[in-house]
Amino acid sequence: MNVNDVRTKYFEYFKARGHVEIPSAPLVPQNDPTTLFTGSGMQPLLPYLLGEAHPKGSRLVDSQKSFRAEDIEEVGDNRHTTFFEMLGNWSLGDYFKKEQLKWFFEFLTDEIGIDPNMLYVTAFMGDEKNILPRDTEATDIWKELFAGKGIEAKTVEIGSEADGYEKGMQGGRIFYYEAKKNWWSRAGTPDKMPAGEPGGPDSEVFYDFGLPHDEAYGPNCHPNCDCGRFMEIGNSVFMQYLKKEDGSFGLLPKQNVDFGGGLERITAASNDNADVFQIDAFKDVIDLLVHFSGRSYDDVAWIRSYRIVADHMRASVFMLADGVRPSNTDRGYVLRRLLRRAAQHAQKLGVENDQKEESMLNRCAVIIIEKYKEAYPELAAEEMYETITSEIWKEEKQFGHALVTGMKEFEKITQDAKTISGEQAFMLFTTYGFPFEMTMEIAQERGIRVDEASFREHMKRHQELSRAGSEQKFKGGLADHSEATTRLHTAHHLLLKALQIVLGDHVKQRGSNITSERLRIDFSHTVKMTPDQIAEVEKIVNDEIKAALPVVRSTLPREDAEKLGAEHEFGAKYPDMVSVYSIGPASASESNPQYDQAFSIEFCGGPHVSNTRELAGTFKIQKEEAVAAGVRRIKAVIQ
């Protein structure tokens, strides 16, 4: 089977059981400051799992585009990918364990045709410290399901993964693990959950590829072993409990099911091939590379490079389609790293480029677009197609220049040297874009040692700083939620509307950053603003501050908000329900926003003042300048 077959069958199966198909949220998360990318199927639906009513009902099914940057270094083995699709079905206070486990088992065995003898499952063994019971309900259901296929499902208590290495399989089919493996909450294990936090046991399904156990991973094998024999293909989370103030647990009044299954992994299991890179989503790209490089995919010297190019190009295509562009910061930095790493390994394979039309990375991108255009038609739209291929080619050219300048610096560093320090390798990587793997290879050829441990330490510190900065930046561009920053956030909304009034409707926000001292907005406009235009914008903003207009938050279906003309970030995709802030008129209220008379309406997660009078000062533009072709920047304050 291919990925489109499995995805289609999954949707059809669950829609036949009352589920409504919902679209994938974008890779760029909305109103979630904790992460750069959507990394799971649960992430966009968390508000509904925590109690909000979903507009589509209580039974949902989807395939969520996901990306995990932490897996970049892991790509190269037979199972890790950065981008993946997470098949999901959801019960919001509707069905529970009996239906969920039965349906997923039937989907795998009856719809996909997987041999049930190759399936193994796990369950929560209980937590005596937190007085949480063993999930015998799930195991009883599993025993009945396997018995229906003529399989006796013996239970084995593993406990910790370390225990598993000692105990091994013991002829079991159902394995009990501790909370670290088979419990879900946002905070982690039960002891780490705060009062009022929901959580519950989960039950995972593993496929057995029958590969021999590698004792490098422990003396014995079991489903959670990392030796490669078993691959997790699905996980049903049962949000069943609520932690009380006294630390005990009670049942949630409304219990939910959150299922996530890796589309690529289920497809690999359906083909009984432990190498996920041999499914169609990757194989067509790898076959292209094999054809032009003349090197065998099965050769241990080349297989890692083939996998890296195939994975990184698929992830890059979907990132570009969701509005991410290569840069030196945040999401753009991750995309740049993917593209340059793919280019490096394509070069290692001996694939050469002559011009844009002959770019091997663009050929890979075209295969990926063709593969996914049925499920994601936006990829094949003419403008998007041109954007994706142009951005890839532009980054390839820049990477070529980076290699030239980086090589010059490398030659300086290594002249008469016996060691490249971690700091020097880090400088080559961050300043010149010179890949660390290339530093290692060039140094090895010359008999020069590289302090890899020190380089990794520099990278770790860099990532921690970047992560901390991102957590601030992606709170809607706000550095914090202090009173001063909140006031400037509301002024930012007034400013955008004033710019549109003075300069024209072509003005759209292209970025923002707001601190307690000043606001900054990047907007689309091709020429420098005149002093008169700046003065007129300031007057409009200050007039609206003096008008003491109410600032009203509403939650609306995305389509309704768009019909109102609510401003939203260029290139961003939004969930079905969105938060909207409107400013004015004077009689507006939460129950009656009067959008048709509002001064400003924007998609926004807040926070804001409740009335423009709270800005309490004079709005002043300090600087107006160009930051890119067709993009201007304003910095302003309230004095």
Image: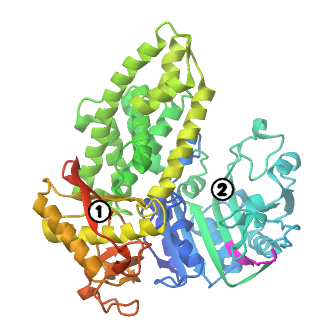
Q: Which residues are magenta?
A: 238-248
The three-letter code of the residue at mark 2 reads Glu
Query: Would you name the residue on which mark 2 appears?
Result: 232
The three-letter code of the residue at mark 1 reads Phe
Q: Residues within 10 Å of mark 1 (few under 14, many from 20)?
A: few
Q: Nearer the viewer, residue 263 or 318?
A: 318
Q: Nearer the viewer, residue 613 or 442?
A: 613
Residue at 50 percent across and 6 percent down: it is 416
Q: Nearer the viewer, residue 90 or 436?
A: 436
Alpha carbon distance from label 1 to label 2: 38 Å
Q: Is residue 455 above or below residue 287?
A: above
Q: Is residue 577 above or below residue 390?
A: below
Q: Is residue 37 visible?
A: no
Residue at 69 percent across and 61 percent down: it is 205
Position in image of residue 345 (x %, y %)? 44, 31
Disc 1, SS? loop
Q: Nearer the viewer, residue 22 or 200?
A: 200
Disc number at residue 570? 1
Q: Which circle's residue, 1 or 2, is located before the other in the chain? A: 2
Q: Is residue 310 visible?
A: yes
> Would you say 212 lies left or right of 589 here?
right
Residue 555 found in image quarter: bottom left
Position in image of residue 469 (x %, y %)? 49, 51
Locate the C terminus by quadrant: bottom left
Residue 181 found in image quarter: bottom right
Foreground tag (1 vs 2)? 1
